[in-house]
Amino acid sequence: MYLTQGLHHVLQQRPHSLATVFRGRRHTYAQLAERVARLAGALQQLGMHSGDRVGLLALNSDRFLEYYLATWWGGGVVNPVNIRWSVAEIVYSLDDCDTRVLMIDDSFLPMAEAIAGSAKVRPLLIHVGDGPAPEGMLSYEQLIHDTAPVGDAFRGGDDLASIMYTGGTTGRPKGVMQSHMNLWSAAVARAADVPVPADALTLHIAPMFHLAALSRVILISLLGLPAVFVPAFEPLDVMQTIERERITDILIVPTMIQALIMHPDFARYDLGCLRDLTYGASPIAVPLLELALKALPNVRFTQGYGMTEAAPPISANGPENHGPEGIANGRLRSAGRPGLGVMVRIVDEHDNEVPRGTVGEVVVRGPNIMLGYWNKPEETAQVLRGGWMHTGDGAYMDEDGYLYIVDRFKDMIVSGGENVYSGEVESAIASHPAVAACAVIGIPCQQWGEAVHAVIVLKADRQALGAEIIEHCRQQIAGYKTPKSVEFRAALPLSGAGKVLKRDLREPYWAGKDRGVS
């Protein structure tokens, strides 16, 4: 099982079929394979050895797919960079896993020197763009043009394929290590659970540094189907592209669904070609689903529940539960049933399985579960104890095997489809000279599902405004992690052991709701 397998297959069977579409560029699979083999050769000539990491900081495009495939073809490991991170966060991820080659597109050129100059080892910079490369950078297109194609390194199985950074409870991101088997098995299982039609045409909207988007890219490439890309989510651009290219499949988050159907020009575009819409990161509110079903009456809706550590699928809630019957029987609120090859249990604090209908922690095992966290053996051992990946999500399973997520045992907030670990935000807040203590929680937000909220105790002799705290955080962490609201208290609620009782802080905001997450 290796991630370039689909490219070899389609080259043998249908080399002149359409592979990628981005703006005015269209490549066949034969052209894609040629570019991939040349880029792989260039990376090897630049010093990439087997298992070396290569980063990419860029918006979505056909070149993102080329980067993935070429790195694997040449024997390397991908480290796609979160485009919403600050310079400090990006540099940490590059330093942490010793990424010495970084590709950057035009959108992020203003950050290039700050990143390179701050890294422990200055990375080799490759400009991913159409124009001339800036001084001190190599040209992506020139490298492809000037380098002879090389053969596939055929790394696969348990060989490391990707390191994707996710938030950390201790204030530092963790590099999730995924093998070729992890990613390959997750994509194949998804295709078995939700078959992809032979004429499917997928539009890649979600940021491709996310594992959910990467998983879809891998699936499409393994099946040898075409992929269309937009740089980022912009409702008008997405609707225009769907209409122009006759897109059949999309993967988005609920906030994107809302932005599309509420757009003032929504009715102007013919989106009747859409057949399947997969959403994830958070459940969908019933009123929003009802609007979406009316606006897109021919579309099948599927919710995916997963996480980076699971590559990412854990369960799926299919179209059968996204209609009047699913709303009436409550299955709409479910995260669905575990996917093919994925074992799921609900356990108590001693890892004993609990009876159906009882809330416990979701634990998972299967070929899709990560190898571990890069250079974090203790955290790896803790989360993978007993051979099961402990998700930190509280849930129950009904008699028919459906999962219902009710809370998070780990301090994570999901805002607009992005994971925010409270430990990271708290570290940023605590560095403010006026802060004595703080706690960060997620509170309900109609637009984003959850919003980051900070509860702060100031030092006795200091003062600060909420806006000041927010701006202080913005200088250190990504905007989506920055608190959207701040409240000041004389003290934080503490347990007998001195631990902050975040459940008590959340309770007033979530009172009357049937679950503690949105």
Image (cartoon, helix red, strand yellow):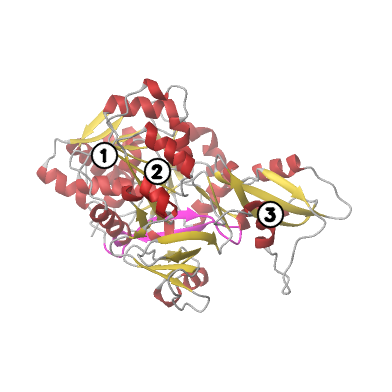
Label 1 sits on what residue type? Thr
Q: Residues within 10 Å of mark 2 (few under 14, many from 20)?
A: many
Residue found at x 47% / y 77%: 351
Is any part of residue 333 visible from this angle?
A: yes
- Residue 459 in percent (x, y) is at 84, 55
- Residue 503 in percent (x, y) is at 65, 62
Residue found at x 16% / y 36%: 17
Q: For the residues marked 3 and 2, what is the alpha-carbon distance in whole angstroms?
A: 36 Å
Residue found at x 72% / y 53%: 455
- Mark closer to the observer (3, 2): 3
Residue found at x 75% / y 53%: 456
Closer-to-camera residue (7/101): 7
484 sits to left or right of 216 = right
Q: Which mark is residue 208?
A: 2
Q: Which of marks 2 and 1 is nearer the N terminus?
A: 1
> Which residue is denoted by mark 1 in the rendering?
147
Q: Quadrant of the N terminus?
A: bottom left
Closer-to-camera residue (23/260): 260
Q: Is mark 1 on a helix, strand or loop?
A: loop
> Which residue is denoted by mark 3 in the rendering?
508
Residue segment shown in magenta: 157-181
Q: Which residue lies furthest to the right in this view?
A: 461
- Residue 254 in percent (x, y) is at 46, 42
Q: How crowded is mark 3: few (under 14 residues within 10 Å), some or many (20 or more)?
A: few
Closer-to-camera residue (46/23): 23
Q: Which of marks 3 and 2 is nearer the N terminus?
A: 2
- Image quarter for residue 38? top left
Whether 180 is among the magenta residues is yes
In the image, residue 365 sits, relative to residue 458, either above or below, namely: below
